[in-house]
Amino acid sequence: MAKTVMAKFKVYLLILLGSCIAAAGINLFLVPNKIAPGGVSGIATVLHYLSNGALPVGMTMLAFDIPLYIIGYRFIGRKFIVRTMFSSISLSLMIDFSNSLLSMVSERYFASSPENAGNLIVFTVFGGLLLGVGLGIVFRVGATTGGTDLAAKILHRFTPKLSLGNLLMCLDGAVIVFATIVFNSIILGLYAIITIFIMSKVIDAIMEGVDFSKCVYIISEKSDIIAERILADIDRGVTALKGTGMYTKKDKEVLFCVLDRSQIPRLKEIVKEIDESAFVILTDAREVLGEGFQNYEHEME
């Protein structure tokens, strides 16, 4: 029971952390420079300027999300919606509560002006970076911040032939076009696209891991000796896969193992020393779970 409570506490603590980071990216770099990177935050940014600041970005985002929660609760499930509601409310509150402080910081150090107009690309990059880190943390624990992500999931129920990625791209693209027209600036629209690209790459890195390991396949007539040396010298497990050479029609053993990047030079030395004609394939492994690598992450209820 205690472990379950702690697991839930950790989930919601991470959601709060992610919301804080995303809010910093929005308030410091994106909203002050009229960069609307799709989604509900992009719509809220445009409406914020159309109302001359009367509509706060955070509460406007929440107002758009509420109808999606009601629909999503029916089609997607309680657990996902509860976490999404919490993350969306957290992000909206963080954006509005930190707005005054972060706006002063942005105006003092980051705001666009004729003197630093060339720095808009820097604001775009760091806005996308912070937004990606924040959303990546939220996504990692099984939630979203609502908005177009949730809208895409709901629409996918009615249009299964369209992938979630395509639906999300269409929704975000429509928001960028809307912002481009309102702000009368194709340049700002292009910067918004850059922000989305950076944000998506950062989210992928957080979701899939950035500590790359290497998968190694070795085909050799001396596979037994190579396997013994890997076990003894590198202390990594090796699995022998059965294969058949389609040209020679002979059965072969294909060695498979996963190594840290730092162990690759030693592996190459071993293979070269034993069989210079061995065929070696190295591929990236984004995330490796199990003995000698990362521990399994227990599902958090």
Image (cartoon, rainbow, N blue to C red):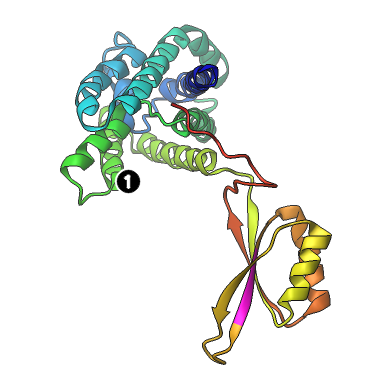
Q: Amino acid at mark 1?
A: Gly
Q: Answer with the quarter of the image where residue 244 lies.
A: bottom right
The vertical placement of 81 against 282, above or below, is above
Q: Which residues are magenta?
A: 252-256
Residue positioned 49% across, 25% down in the render: 114
The residue carrying mark 1 is: 165
For the residue pair 41 and 65, the one nearer the viewer reads as 65
User: Does any portion of residue 42 appear in the rendered image?
Assistant: no
The image shows residue 192 at horizontal and vertical percentages of: 39, 36
For the residue pair 10 and 290, the one nearer the viewer reads as 290
- Decide whether the magenta segment is chiefly helix, strand or loop: strand
Residue positioned 36% across, 29% down in the render: 36
For the residue pair 77 and 14, the one nearer the viewer reads as 77
Q: Residues within 10 Å of mark 1 (few under 14, many from 20)?
A: few
The vertical placement of 267 against 135, above or below, is below
Residue positioned 35% across, 37% down in the render: 189
